[in-house]
């Protein structure tokens, strides 16, 4: 059958007679060899054989995930996610900058790079001392300090200590124990009793503010007339 089909194909392609005879001989020899190898013809396909598909077993039909009530589709959440996956909590995505700031605020010290300096805890006394340090330019007119551009009242990490004078500074740079106070504000106010500089400065400011007004001319007339006469 295969040889006859091949002969028909060769003739339709327009081959010569010599070529056709040679090709027919090759096909016949090949067909004989195949028959010797498979005498029963088990591997030959017959036209009458038909392939039958196996029977399908439908089994249980899965129920739909949605139900329709009054034209509104509703999903069954219990079937969308199983119980095992439902127990897994969702991870919240956070901003990395905010996470770093929060962890930085939670640190008790500044780290080993800053000698484990503790976090600043602002008490009422420390708060008043920090305000006084920011206004230290007005304490002494003969001293000039570098301008402070930091807006924060106190640094994030700080440590308070006490300077201990050496034996050579016992009388020159040492503050006596009677004049020492607990805070800087206490020492400044105690020193004001002896100098009176703040009171004097306050009077100068008030005099400049009232200059040119009725109270200023009233005091000026009193000075010229020798003060107020008492009866």
Image (cartoon, grey):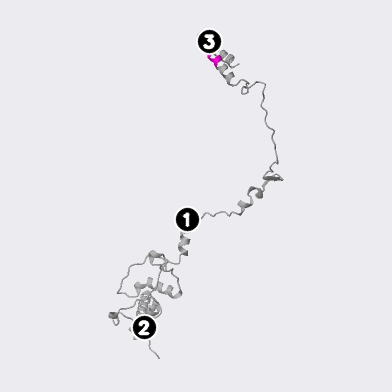
Residue located beneath label 1 in the image: 96
Q: Is residue 153 above or below residue 82?
A: below
Among the 4 quarters of the image, the one containing residue 155: bottom left
Q: Secondary structure at mark 3?
A: helix
Above-or-below relation of 111 to 169? above
Identify which residue is drawn at 67% across, 45% down: 66
Q: Position of residue 180 (x, y in %)?
A: 37, 81
The main secondary structure of the magenta stretch is helix
- Tell which tag, 2 or 3, sits nearer the viewer: 3
Magenta part of the protein: which range? 20-29
Q: Which of pointers 3 and 1 lies earlier in the amino acid sequence?
A: 3
Q: Which residue is mark 2?
A: 179
Q: Earlier in the sequence, mark 2 or mark 3?
A: 3
SS category of the residue bearing label 2 = helix
- Residue at which label 3 appears: 21
The quadrant holding residue 115 is bottom left
Decide: few, some or many residues near mark 1? Use Cα within 10 Å; few <14, some 14-19, many ≥20.
few
Q: Is residue 55 left or right of residue 101?
A: right
Residue at the extreme top: 17
Considering the image in quadrants, where does the N terminus appear? top right
The residue located at (47%, 64%) in the rendering is 106
Cα distance, mark 2 to mark 3? 135 Å
Residue 172, by quadrant, is: bottom left
Confirm whether the magenta stretch covers residue 3: no
């Amino acid at each position: 059958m295969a040889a006859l089909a091949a002969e028909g194909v060769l003739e339709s392609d327009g081959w010569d007679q010599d070529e056709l005879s040679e090709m027919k001989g090759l096909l016949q020899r090949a067909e004989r060899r195949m028959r010797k190898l498979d005498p029963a013809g088990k591997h030959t396909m017959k036209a009458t054989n038909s392939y039958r598909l196996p029977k399908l077993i439908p089994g249980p039909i899965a129920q739909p995930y949605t139900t329709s009530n009054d034209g509104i589709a509703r999903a069954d959440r219990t079937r969308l996610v199983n119980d095992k996956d439902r127990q897994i909590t969702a991870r919240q995505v956070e901003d990395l900058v905010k996470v770093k700031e929060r962890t930085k605020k939670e640190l008790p010290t500044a780290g080993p790079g800053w000698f484990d300096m503790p976090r600043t805890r602002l008490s009422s006394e420390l708060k008043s001392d920090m305000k006084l340090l920011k206004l230290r330019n007005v304490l002494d007119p003969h001293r000039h300090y570098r301008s402070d551009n930091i807006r924060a009242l106190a640094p994030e990490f700080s440590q308070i200590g006490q300077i201990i004078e050496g034996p050579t500074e016992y009388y020159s740079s040492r503050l006596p124990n009677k004049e020492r106070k607990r805070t800087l504000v206490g020492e400044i106010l105690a020193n004001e009793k002896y100098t009176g500089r703040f009171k004097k400065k306050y009077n100068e400011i008030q005099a400049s503010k009232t200059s040119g007004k009725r109270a200023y001319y009233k005091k000026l007339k009193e000075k010229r007339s020798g003060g107020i006469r008492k009866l």
